Image: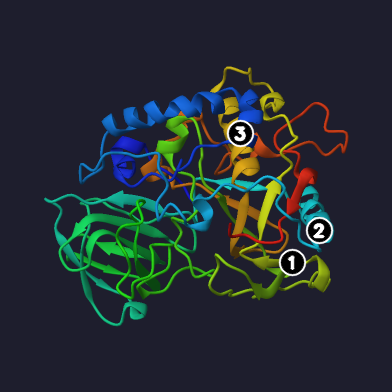
Amino acid sequence: AGTSGAAGTSGAAGTSGAAGTSGAAGTSGAAGASGAAGASGAAGTSGAAGTSGAAGSGGAPASSTPPYAPDFALNREIPAGAALDARSGAVIGRLVTNLLAKRVQLSNHNDVPTVYTVGPTDESYQVQVSTLGGPISFRVPAGAVPGTGSDHPLIVLDPEHPSYGPFTELRLWQASVDHAAKRVTASGGGLFHYNNDGRILNPNGSPSHSNAFLGAGTGSGLSYLAGLIRPEEVRAGAIRHALRFAYSNCDSSARFRAPATKTDQPKNCVGPMAPEGERMDMGMRLQLDPQVDCSRRVVPGKPDSSAETRFLRMFCVALQDYGMIMLDGSSPGSVVFYMENEQTAGFNQLIGADRYGGYSELILGQADPADEPPLGIPWRRLRVLAQSVF
């Protein structure tokens, strides 16, 4: 997963935020104890404040409203009493075993995307990606760079593309930017509409649900932007969408369910595969038990008033209200949550300094099943839902 630079500096703040849609109702209320999350309701106003934030290179206001249509699966809250998948216990048991053997990752560096929003003065570059069917023209901010790691992911958002229309997203994998030649190359990529009001449709009349109208998405068919944790929502105090995560290739099935439109798993597994009944399907939605008191979750050595604790509780409430959805594969045994790359997000100023390439230590959880003290996220209390789209 990747990094995330200073919000205002890289202009990520100028992108379409990835947070709140309908606010975190019921469970979030219960977790209102999450304190910060409760204030996140008021964060509607803080979201407005976000608009005053530095707009990236294009001057587009920052927003804590998540991208894509309001009825997009990741933007919908989990209804009370949602049915559980018949394999929930087996899948979660395997997940917990992996987490105990290889800690969860919450990454803002390496294989997570930088995000830029272009403006009217940014120049057009020639983008060469085979999945797009030939060279296209797309504006790119001066100084834009992809994320690091082996994926080198990059997202560029154009609020008013001259050819493809308003709110056009360019998603690239293994991207390289040559600013001198004004040329971008990548091993894969796609074009999407990222508007969050549902009014702009894809050329085939379908809504903007993170499905590429040209080219391709990631292993799930969706863009990196779907479920990505953004600085605008952290600033606002609430994450109002499901969280994107990648899961162990050796513990994944060859099945997928909506909102995923395909799967590229399992692939490149060099170890033994998990028993079929314990494997996770691409698109599976997991939820943290709403009875967990997010207001009690703590970060070792940090007071309740700290930015780190505030973020942990925000993360906890999001897992209850919206859940987490498998949208990519990862190395054997690993679980990776995606944050915007530090190069464009500036999480270090919002959450505190990251360690070892991310914020994993904030959500690690307690190895003791008794969950005392209530550290991080109690991963044993996750459950798999029977469906991911509501």
Q: Quadrant of residue 342?
A: top left
Res. 232 mark: none
Among the two numbered marks 2 and 3 on one chain, the one whose residue lies closer to the N terminus: 3
Vertical side of 172 occupied by 294: above or below: above
Q: Amino acid at mark 2?
A: Arg
**Tag nearer the camera, 2 or 3:** 3
Image quadrant holding the C terminus, namely bottom right
Q: Circle 1 — which element?
A: helix
Could you classify mark 2 by the number of other residues whose Cα lies within 10 Å: few (under 14), some (14-19), or many (20 or more)? some
Q: Position of residue 244 (x, y in %)?
A: 56, 54
Residue shown at 43% from the left, 31% from the top: 235
- Which residue is the site of mark 3? 28
Among the two numbered marks 2 and 1 on one chain, the one whose residue lies closer to the N terminus: 2
- Which residue is the site of mark 1? 251
Res. 94 mark: 2
Q: Circle 3 — which element?
A: helix
Q: Circle 2 — which element?
A: helix
Residue shown at 65% from the left, 63% from the top: 331
In the picture, measured across the screen, residue 157 lies left or right of residue 332, that is left
In the picture, measured across the screen, residue 232 lies left or right of residue 337, that is left
Residue nearest the observer in this picture, 276 or 2:
276
Vertical side of 139 occupied by 314: above or below: above
Residue shown at 73% from the left, 59% from the top: 333
